[in-house]
Amino acid sequence: MSEDRKIRVLIAKPGLDGHERGARIIAYGLRDAGFEVIYTGLRQTPAEIARAAVQEDVDLVGLSILSGAHLSLTRKVLDRLSEMNASDIPVIVGGVVPPEDAETLASMGVAGVFTAGTPVSAVADFIRAQIAKKTD
């Protein structure tokens, strides 16, 4: 990736979860940190999220899930990305995720899991590192 191109991140709220405060904080924080952020809004299906990620040519997808359905929704997003030949797009998950589920998400291929209270700067640093690994 060229140094003058901003990292493009899609922030999505899959499922019926109506709480978007955390997603907005991350979206605004990443924007302020120099990222180009596409926020899909509430109640997106896994197919809509994958389609948006491909159409917007994003470098990373961030899923914000507080509903407790993080395992099934994340699996569906990963499956949809794979079906679209876009499984090379890293996916991170934020929200209320028990430690044992974070391990399961990692085994599914999720690049990182961030729970409530994680500083935006830590998320931004992680994303930069993920993108640097992809371009090496």
Image (tube, rainbow, N blue to C red):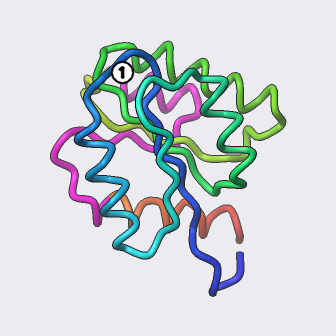
Can you give x and y, in whole percent of width and height, for residue 40 in the image? 50, 40
Image-based side of 1 in relation to 131, left or right? right
**55 shown above or below 135:** above
Q: Please give the name of the residue rendered at 74% of the width and 44% of the height, measured from the top-left corner.
A: 54
Tell me which segment is drawn in magenta.
101-122
Q: Residue at x 54, y 49 (%)?
A: 10
Q: Is residue 96 left or right of residue 60?
A: left
Residue ID at (55%, 60%)? 130
Q: Which of 43 and 6 is in front in this view?
A: 43
Q: In this view, does 18 lie to the left or right of 82?
A: left
Q: Which of 127 and 44 is in front in this view?
A: 44
Residue 43, x across and y down, in percent: 44, 23
Residue type marked 1: Asp
* Residue 61 highlighted magenta (yes or no): no
Camera-side residue of 2 and 49: 49
Q: In which quadrant of the rendered view does residue 120 lie?
A: bottom left
Is 17 on the left or on the right of 46, as rendered? left
Instruction: Give the position of the N terminus as an image quadrant.
Output: bottom right
Q: Dot 1 corresponds to which residue?
A: 101
Say which element carries label 1: helix
Which quadrant is the C terminus positioned in?
bottom right
Outermost residue on the left side: it is 117
Q: State which quadrant residue 131 falls in.
A: bottom right
